[in-house]
Amino acid sequence: MYDTSKVINITKDDVLKKTSQYEIYATYLGFKPTIGEVYISPFRKDSNPSFGLYMSRKSGNIMFKDLGTGESGDCFKFASLIENVSVKQIIKNIYKQYVSNKVTRKPITVPIKEYKDLDIVVDDIPYTAEGLAFWAGFGITENTLKLYNVKQIKKFWVNAIEYWTATKTSPMFAYFVYSKTKIYRPYYKKQKFYTNCTSIDIQGWEQLDYSRDTVYITKSTKDVMLLHELGYSAIAPNGEGHDIPDKVLSILRDKFKRIVILYDRDLPGLKASRKLWRLNKDLDFLFMPRKTEKDLSDYYRKYGKIKTLKLLSDYENKSNRI
């Protein structure tokens, strides 16, 4: 038979006119996988399932990811790794198989895992110099990042769909709050955060130091970690708009002599502080001085450790009410 693959440049699109991405995965895996499920890796001995397929929101392609090795890519790269040949060669091989068998592509339903809640999976990486430099600007060290289970990540998936990818100059991080995840992209003005946390997921709760007299309720994990670096205990709700559960406040009252609200000096922060204080008038509050930065982290970045410590110590012996 005349082999066209030897005389023409076969492309991925040529192959996908004969078959589908999903069928290629199913053929080389030997079973029909569900998008979003996790399986034993086909590349290595794998005691814990760490391989899966997901949808790329950007390209619409079905991609694979081996969380054990970090290997990822499309169906052609997957097949090339299985066969241990180049991607160029695997494209020819698959095309030749379907042409010789005169196979006509048929519509196929791709099974996708059903999710009741937002399932976030991250691809974490070792901290880069750029990542550590970002946190160092706020006085936060790598040891504190580890304590609060904050990781630098390359990309993440939501319900088996690939979302944002980090770059060297725009690192991305993940906060882990018990079984929940919060993604943080500090250099983006819009969509800085993506999370499945709710009002009951309190940032910093696992790391609370109960030996202190005072605990701060602030608005972010970043501020919580900075306060820890400065020698203070702190927690943060999922956001200033989230209520603090009564059970949480009850435990704090039992463990600490003083509870201080430390939200941003902006309209959302002021409104949230007033709301929280009106319901709990035994709480104190602290705002950044006027005409300075709106939150503690930015204040530290601008004025440094000594002035930030002085700011906090000046308020330690004051009773502040809204």
Image (cartoon, rainbow, N blue to C red):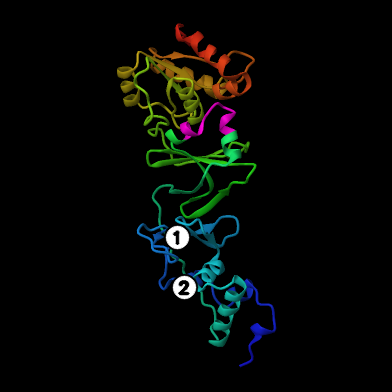
Q: Which amino acid does label 2 sit on?
A: Tyr
* Disc 2 residue crowd, few under 14, some 14–19, many 20+, Cα 10 Å: some
Residue 10: name its quadrant.
bottom right
Q: Please tell me whether residue 208 is drawn above or below residue 20 in the rendered image.
A: above
Instruction: Estimate the x, y position of residue 277 in percent, counting from the top left.
Output: 43, 16
Marking on residue 85: none
Q: Which of marks 2 and 1 is nearer the N terminus?
A: 2
Instruction: Estimate the x, y position of residue 269 in percent, counting from the top left.
Output: 53, 22
Can residue 203 be seen from the camera position used here? Answer: yes
Q: Which residue is depicted at the point 48% across and 28% down?
A: 225
* Disc 1 residue crowd, few under 14, some 14–19, many 20+, Cα 10 Å: many
Camera-nearest residue between 308 and 63: 308
Q: Please tell me whether residue 136 is drawn above or below residue 215 in the rendered image.
A: below
Q: In which quarter of the image is the N terminus?
A: bottom right
Camera-nearest residue between 57 and 176: 176
Residue at mark 2 to residue at mark 1: CA–CA distance: 14 Å
Instruction: Estimate the x, y position of residue 133 in percent, counting from the top left.
Output: 60, 34
On whether residue 104 falls in the magenta region, the answer is: no
Residue 135: name its quadrant.
top right
Q: Which residue is depicted at the point 45% across and 24% down?
A: 228
Q: Is residue 131 left or right of residue 227?
A: right
Q: Please tell me whether residue 97 is drawn above or below residue 259 in the rendered image.
A: below
Q: Please tell me whether residue 246 is drawn above or below residue 29 in the rendered image.
A: above
Q: Mark 1 points at which residue?
A: 52
Can residue 288 be seen from the camera position used here? Answer: no
Helix, strand or loop under label 1: strand
Instruction: Estimate the x, y position of residue 4 in percent, counting from the top left.
Output: 65, 85
Magenta region: 134-145
Q: Mark 2 points at which residue?
A: 28
On whether residue 143 falls in the magenta region, the answer is: yes
